[in-house]
Structure formats: structure tokens, C-alpha cells
Image (cartoon, rainbow, N blue to C red):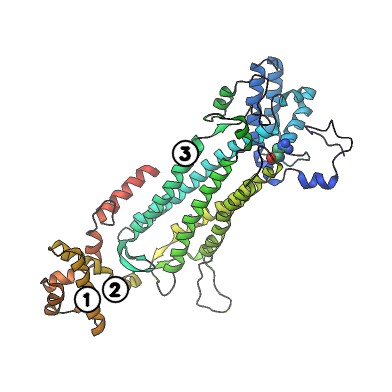
């Protein structure tokens, strides 16, 4: 079968098998490249005119044809041709006739598809950054709204020390900020593959530097073969998505735990929970569970992509056509995860009564007691041991740490703390506000962080 818009075919006696045609055509993801294929082609056409391959009049004709195509079809058109490049070519031929065939001079689909992909990924990363910013803002607003709430922190999922809930929430904002920084770097540091052609470059003199500049890319490629073989931009974008998924999964896991009746200090918005068909009391955190599950798919995609690239011979191989499929399906998975998480953040609340009970756990203040001893001149090792012994004593006696009496305390701690001084150590507020170390959880530090993020995110 002979197909329209095909860039090749002269050396073939028979046309392509129908089965092969359907098997090999650019699939769904190709369509996302459409506007970028036009954009890259416009720049290529300008370079061809500058090199004298196209007359000024031809250039204008082709340019207006390309712009018409962009207007004519939706952003993601359906087409019959072999791939998006053939579709653009064929559509152009319908408008400007055989002149369209000149456009593909000094160009291969190999440099074109690489260029299209880079341009698409940059735009997508900018959109992803906006999404992350939105989530960061939602977290910041929640941190401000609940700025007086104190919760336990955990290491090994065992109660550690108390922190402001807002301090805990802000920790995710700084995690996402590292992803944003990496997005910025990735967007800024892309090289233009145009004129690399099939990997060897071309004998036709095109101004690669201007082309790179016009596309807003850092510079032309550093090596024409690398320009064609390289798919690191996909890999980097997938790694960025993996990082987002990892953060989302950790938030999800924490909040599944914190909203369970045993922890019970977080209240999830009903609109993002489900009930049980048998147990009438249930309010299940399904949205968070699905985020946790889908994070696995997003994380797996980078691995899948590495498997696609692994041991591929230089330079272009048709395997690379699958790059877009992995990338765009992963993106489709991730974006709703961010949207849902943002709404959960906005809708979540706390159960203050339950929190008050949880904060009664004396061990949350054991470190404060130890630091109190250190501040009074006891060395760290002795202070640690002494508090440990006091804990053992209180456990053996079946009493709370705060209830050990003064003489007993003095015997073990080697320091006489009045009842008032001793009792004060078990105050959640005093405990958090004493953590004035750099960006620690003391109120003033948390407020400074909120102020910082407010200026960064506004
Ligand atoms: N559809 C192809 C892709 O996505 C475009 C490049 C095809 N090049 C080739 N020599 N067959 O990678």
C-alpha cells in the first residue's frame, strides 16, 4: 500500500503491509507533538531561507501555510499519516502544493522528533511547576490556618518529640522546592538538535545557533550524533515526576496513618474518602491510598524508560518512538494525583481533643529533660543515661515520668529540679518554642518560614 505524506518509499517495490502500517504508526502520544512540530518547522524554514534554499516568497508562503495548519486542527489532531511529521508535511502540501517538499531539506525526522520532544517537555515541565506551586500554596495556607496546633513527630514511626503541625507541613514545601529547582534547571539547559539530521549533520549550511536561539533553547547540540541518540530530557522529566510521586506518596502514607482511629489526630475531607459496604462506621482514605498506589506506577516509568534506552546502538532506533508513550501516560497519571492532593490539603482538619490526649505522652519530652540537664552542666552521655534510668524507674513503678517525686529524681538525675521546674518540661508549648535552632520548630522560626514561603510563592 502506498500512503500519503510519506517521507520515503522510492526504493521499495511493494508498499508496506497493512499490519505493519498499523503496528508501526506513531501512536496517541505523537499527537502531543503537533504544535511543537510546527514551531520547529517554522524555525527550520527561516534557516532554509537564510541559506538561500527557499526564496523569500516561498518562505512566506510556507510560513503562512504552517500557521494555517496550526489554526485548522485542534492542538492534538487525529490523522491518517505515518506520524505527526508526515501529517504536518501532508497538510502543508494540501495548502502550498509541491513546495511543501522543500521543507524537509537538510532535516531528518530524527532531529525533528528530538526537537519536538524537547520543546514539548519544556512546556510540560513549566505546567508541572505551576501545579507544584499550587500545591505548595495550599500547604502554606493550611500551615498558616493551623499555626497553633502541636503534634508529635516520629522517627521509626515511634513518638519522637513535639513539633508544630505547620512545621511538619512546611517540610513538604521545601521538599517540593528542590523539585522546582530541578525543573528550572532542566527547562534552562536544553540543546537544540536541529541540523543534526540523521546524526551526521548536513552539507547544507544552516545557522544552527540562530535556530537554537529562536526556539528559546540554550545552544545547538554539542555533537550531532549525541543530538539524535540523546533522550536524557525524557529521563530527567521522568525523574522529576518520580520525585513528585515520592513526595506525594509519603504525604499520603503519613495522613493515612494520622487519620486512623489509633492515631486519630487528622480529619480528612469527606469528599475524598469512601465508606464500607458492610461496616457502617468506616471512613476510608481511598484517595490517599490511590495516590500511594499510583506513585508506584510513576516511579516505575523511569525504570521502564531506562530499559528502553539500555544498550541501544547509536544513534536513532525505532525503539525511541516509544519514548513518548511512556512519558505522556506517566504524566496523565501524575497530574490528577497532584490535583487531588491539593484538595485534600485544603480540606483537612485536626481533631484537637485527640491531639491533646496524644500530647500527654511523657516520652515526647524526654529529650527536653535531657537537654535541661545539659544546660545545667551535666555532660551529654551522663544526662542521656540518667533520663533513661528515670524512664526505667517510672515504667517499673507503673507511673508517669512527670510523676516521679523530687527526692527520687534528684537521686537519679544528680540535679535538684523543683516540682515547678520539672513539671514545666512536659509542656508541649514550652517544648516546641524552645527549639530555636536554625529553621527549627519554635514558633518564631515557623513564622519566619511562613513569611519566607509567602514571598517565594506569591
Ligand atoms: N515517529 C518517529 C519517532 O517517534 C519519528 C522518527 C522516525 N524516524 C525514522 N527514521 N523512522 O521516533
Residue 445 versus residue 399: which sits nearer the camera?
399
Picture quadrant of ligand 1: top right
Disc on res. 185: 3
Residue 371 versus residue 126: which sits nearer the camera?
371
- The quarter of the picture where residue 197 lies is top right
Label 3 and label 1: CA atoms lie apart by 52 Å
Residue 44 versus residue 204: which sits nearer the camera?
204
Instruction: Give the labeled residue for mark 2.
Output: 361
Task: Name the secondary structure under disc 2.
Answer: loop
Q: Is 91 situated left or right of 17 in this image? A: left
Residue 234 image position (x, y, % from top left): 58, 43
Mark 3 crowd level (few <14, some 14–19, many ≥20, 10 Å Cα): few
Q: Can the viewer see residue 115?
A: no
Work out which quarter of the rendered image holds the C terminus and state it: top left
Residue lying farthest to the bottom in this orientation: 397
Residue 435 image position (x, y, % from top left): 24, 58
Q: Mark 2–mark 1 contact, CB under 8 Å? A: no
259 over 454 or under it: above or below: below
Q: Can the viewer see residue 187?
A: yes
Pointer 2 residue Cβ closer than 8 Å to ligand 1: no
Q: Is 338 situated left or right of 312 in this image? A: left
Task: Name the secondary structure under disc 3.
Answer: helix
Label 2 and label 1: CA atoms lie apart by 17 Å
Q: Nearer the viewer, mark 3 or mark 1?
A: 1
Amino acid at each position: 500500500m502506498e500512503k500519503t505524506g510519506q517521507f520515503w518509499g522510492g526504493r521499495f517495490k511493494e508498499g508496506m503491509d497493512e499490519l505493519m502500517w498499523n503496528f508501526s504508526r506513531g501512536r496517541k502520544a505523537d499527537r502531543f507533538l503537533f504544535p511543537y512540530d510546527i514551531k520547529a518547522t517554522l524555525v527550520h524554514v527561516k534557516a532554509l531561507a537564510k541559506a538561500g534554499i527557499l526564496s523569500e516568497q516561498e518562505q512566506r508562503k510556507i510560513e503562512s501555510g504552517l500557521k494555517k495548519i496550526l489554526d485548522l486542527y485542534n492542538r492534538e489532531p487525529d490523522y491518517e499519516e505515518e506520524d505527526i511529521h508526515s501529517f504536518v508535511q501532508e497538510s502543508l502540501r494540501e495548502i502550498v502544493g509541491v513546495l511543501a517538499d522543500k521543507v524537509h531539506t537538510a532535516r531528518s525526522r530524527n532531529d525533528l522528533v528530538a526537537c519536538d520532544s524537547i520543546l514539548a517537555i519544556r512546556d510540560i515541565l513549566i505546567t508541572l511547576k505551576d501545579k507544584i506551586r499550587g500545591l505548595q500554596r495550599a500547604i502554606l495556607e493550611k500551615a498558616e490556618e493551623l499555626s497553633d496546633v502541636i503534634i508529635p513527630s516520629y522517627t521509626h514511626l515511634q513518638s519522637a518529640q513535639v513539633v508544630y503541625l505547620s512545621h511538619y507541613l512546611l517540610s513538604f514545601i521545601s521538599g517540593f522546592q528542590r523539585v522546582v529547582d530541578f525543573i528550572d534547571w532542566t527547562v534552562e539547559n536544553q540543546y537544540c538538535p536541529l541540523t543534526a539530521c540523521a546524526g551526521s549533520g548536513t552539507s547544507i549550511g544552516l545557522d544552527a545557533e540562530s535556530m537554537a536561539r529562536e526556539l528559546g533553547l540554550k545552544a545547538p547540540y554539542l555533537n550531532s550524533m549525541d543530538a539524535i541518540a540523546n533522550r536524557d530530557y525524557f529521563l530527567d522529566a521522568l525523574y522529576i515526576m518520580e520525585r513528585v510521586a515520592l513526595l506525594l506518596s509519603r504525604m499520603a502514607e503519613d495522613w493515612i496513618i494520622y487519620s486512623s482511629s489509633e492515631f486519630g489526630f487528622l480529619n480528612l475531607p469527606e469528599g475524598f474518602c469512601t465508606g464500607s459496604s458492610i461496616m457502617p462506621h468506616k471512613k476510608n482514605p481511598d484517595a490517599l491510598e490511590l495516590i500511594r498506589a499510583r506513585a508506584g506506577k510513576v516511579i516505575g516509568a523511569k525504570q521502564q524508560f531506562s530499559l528502553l534506552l539500555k544498550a541501544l546502538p547509536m544513534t536513532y532506533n525505532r525503539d525511541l518512538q516509544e519514548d513518548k508513550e511512556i512519558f505522556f501516560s506517566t504524566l496523565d497519571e501524575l497530574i490528577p494525583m497532584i490535583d487531588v492532593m491539593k484538595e485534600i490539603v485544603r480540606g483537612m482538619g485536626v481533631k484537637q481533643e485527640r491531639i491533646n490526649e496524644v500530647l500527654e505522652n511523657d516520652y515526647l519530652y524526654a529529650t527536653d529533660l535531657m537537654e535541661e540537664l545539659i544546660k545545667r552542666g551535666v555532660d551529654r552521655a551522663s544526662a542521656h543515661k540518667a533520663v533513661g534510668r528515670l524512664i526505667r524507674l517510672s515504667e517499673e513503678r507503673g507511673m508517669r515520668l512527670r510523676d516521679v517525686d523530687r527526692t527520687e529524681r534528684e537521686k537519679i538525675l544528680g540535679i535538684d529540679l523543683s516540682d515547678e521546674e520539672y513539671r514545666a518540661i512536659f509542656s508541649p508549648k514550652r517544648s516546641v518554642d524552645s527549639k530555636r535552632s536554625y529553621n527549627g520548630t519554635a514558633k518564631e522560626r515557623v513564622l519566619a518560614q511562613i513569611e519566607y514561603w509567602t514571598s517565594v510563592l506569591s
